[in-house]
Image (cartoon, rainbow, N blue to C red):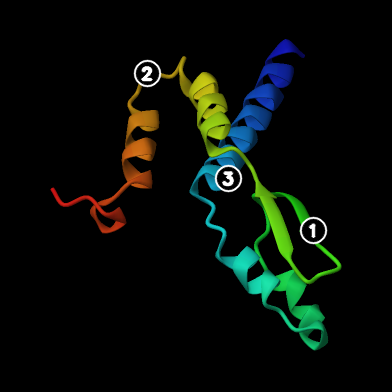
C-alpha cells in the first residue's frame, strides 16, 4: 500500500514539474491576440493559450490590462521540486529557456 501511495505522489510531482515547465516557457502572444480580437470573433478565445494569465481586465474606456504569472517564482518552485534530483535536468532546462536567438551575441 505504501509503495502505491509513493508511486502516486511521484506521478503527481511529475505532473506538477511538467506544468511548471510549461508556465516557465509560456509566451504571451495569445494575450496580445485576445486584446485585439473583434467581438464577432469571440469563438476563437477557446483556441488561445492563456495558461500564464492571472488576471484580465477590459476597462470601459477600451483599455486592456493583463497580469501574468511571476516566472521567477515559477522557476524557484521548479528548482525546489527538482533540486533533490542532481542529474543535470534543471540546468539543461534552464539553458534551453535562453538561446542565441533571444539576443545573445556570443
| Mark 3: secondary structure | helix
Q: Which residue is mark 3?
A: 23
Residue 90 falls left or right of residue 28: left
Please name the residue shown 57% across and 59% down the image.
28
Residue 85 falls left or right of residue 80: left
Which image quarter is the N terminus in?
top right
State how far apart marks 1 and 2 are (Cα): 42 Å
Q: Which mark is residue 57?
A: 1
Task: Give percent across and percent down for residue 57.
Answer: 79, 58
State how far apart marks 3 and 2 are (Cα): 22 Å
Task: Give percent across and percent down for residue 82.
Answer: 48, 23
Residue 68 falls left or right of residue 79: right
**Circles 1 and 3: CB atoms closer than 8 Å:** no
Please name the residue shown 81% across and 70% down the image.
61
| Mark 2: secondary structure | loop
Task: Give percent across and percent down for residue 79.
Answer: 48, 24
| Mark 1: secondary structure | strand
State how far apart marks 1 and 3 are (Cα): 21 Å
Q: Earlier in the sequence, mark 3 or mark 2?
A: 3
Q: Which mark is residue 39?
A: none
**Circles 3 and 2: CB atoms closer than 8 Å:** no
- Is 88 drawn above or below residue 71 in the view shown? above
Q: Which residue is mark 2?
A: 86
- Is 82 drawn above or below residue 46 in the view shown? above
Q: Earlier in the sequence, mark 1 or mark 2?
A: 1
**Circles 1 and 2: CB atoms closer than 8 Å:** no
- Is 85 drawn above or below residue 62 in the view shown? above
- Is 17 drawn above or below residue 26 in the view shown? above
The front one of 22 and 11 is 22
Where residue 56 sits, quadrant-wise, is bottom right
Amino acid at each position: 500500500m505504501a509503495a502505491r501511495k509513493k508511486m502516486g505522489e511521484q506521478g503527481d510531482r511529475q505532473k506538477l514539474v511538467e506544468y511548471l515547465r510549461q508556465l516557465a516557457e509560456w509566451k504571451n502572444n495569445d494575450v496580445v491576440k485576445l486584446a485585439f480580437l473583434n467581438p464577432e470573433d469571440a469563438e476563437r478565445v477557446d483556441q488561445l493559450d492563456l495558461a500564464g494569465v492571472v488576471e484580465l481586465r477590459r476597462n470601459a474606456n477600451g483599455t486592456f490590462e493583463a497580469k501574468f504569472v511571476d516566472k521567477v517564482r515559477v522557476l524557484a518552485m521548479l528548482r525546489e521540486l527538482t533540486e533533490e534530483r542532481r542529474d543535470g535536468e534543471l540546468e539543461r532546462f534552464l539553458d534551453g529557456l535562453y538561446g542565441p536567438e533571444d539576443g545573445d551575441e556570443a
